[in-house]
Image: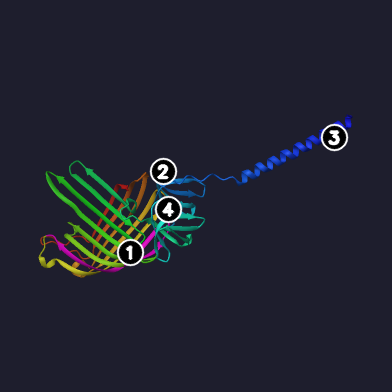
Amino acid sequence: MSSHDHIVNKYLLLIIASISFSSYGQQSLEQTDIWSPPLPVFSQQFDWLKLRSGEWLKGDIVSMYDDELEFESEEFNTIIFDWENVTELRSRFDQQIRFANGEVKQGFLIVKDNHLVLISGGTEQHYPLSELLSITSSSDDRKELWDGKVSLGIDVNKGNVNQLDYLASAKVQRRTPFTRFRIDFSYYYSKSTADENEQVITDTSRLTSNLDWFYSSKVFFRVFDYEHFSDLQQNIKYRDTLGLSLGYHLMQNKRLQWDVTLGPSYQQTVYYNTTDESDQSSGVVALGTLFDYSISSRIDYIFDYQLQFVEENSGKRNSHLKTGLEFEFIDDFELDFTFYIDRVAKPVASADSVPPESNDYRLILSIGYDF
């Protein structure tokens, strides 16, 4: 073989090797482009959630409302996801699904590709995901329908005057696609001791309870609205108010809830150390607003104001303001700075004293636990 033929053969071998390597690389690239991670085995012991990042989580669907999905897993506890970051959701139990038109359906839930599939009685029903308003458990006794908080604040002073101040408060709420039930309770007590003489400075309590029925995404009816109030300094042994009202969501999104309510009530007031004739009953026009804003993932601001227009002998105008900041310093524990104002425009005096001041102010530091 001549040297010329030998050189030609070398070039041919190089060309063939280059073509083979290029072909193999192209095939590898194509295989890489079309590869996707395998689906998990969907154990029926869990609900399943897929994020835009491709990650899967197993656990329990708690609820979805205001474009936020609350999901609980053993590994990460309870997490709230923006609904826009969820690409797939599968339930193991029946869920109650509320749509934007007010219709409520129940069944096993699959959310995928901006589409919602509801399986009930062996039948599939398909809906655009844009029509979905909320998701809650269809089981009335599941604990996930409830949430609450308890708080305690104590101030102890020792010296020439020994003084004890404390505040205890609690609230619980239950929410379904159609209703919201809430109970709030607070008790504030303060006493001082000097030269073995004990004096109660403050002794006041308030219990409120209401039940809201959601007519639409904006309008709700407060079909039950009750308040029990007592205040030693205001000479009020107890004041009970029962009524109903119409409510409206001025704003409602992932970070802000702003509601207003207006409606009629009936009020009965019994006073300390006064004549029976001073006890009063009155019709009431009640106005209220609740502004709850999440400044960050760990800081919330609350403004809650309630105003009652009553007859002059019942105080003329009774109002309650609660406003402040809640700081979550570790999981489920919060540090609360809360300012209260209770006002009776025309207070009633006891039989042996002058009329009390109209306004009572309190600034409270307390620690709360969310559950």
| Residue topped by disc 3 | 8
Discs 2/3, front: 3
Task: Tell me the element at label 1.
Answer: strand
> What residue would you read off at disc 4?
69
Q: In this view, does 80 lie to the left or right of 195?
A: right
Q: Can you say whether 1 is above or below 361 in the image?
A: above
Do the residues under discs 4 and 3 have CB atoms within 8 angstroms? Answer: no
What is the x, y in percent for residue 246? 32, 68
Task: Looking at the picture, tell me which residue is in the foreground, 148 or 102.
Answer: 102
Q: Mark 2 = which residue? A: 76
Give the CA distance from mark 4 to mark 2.
14 Å
Which of 13 and 278 lies nearest the eye of the viewer?
13
Categorize mark 4 by other alpha carbons within 10 Å: few (<14), some (14-19), many (20+): many
Q: In which quarter of the image is the N terminus?
A: top right
Disc 3 is placed on an element classified as helix
Query: Where does residue 24 sit, x and y in percent of width and height?
Result: 69, 40
First reached walking from the N terminus: tag 1 or tag 2: 2
Q: What range is drawn magenta here?
A: 246-272
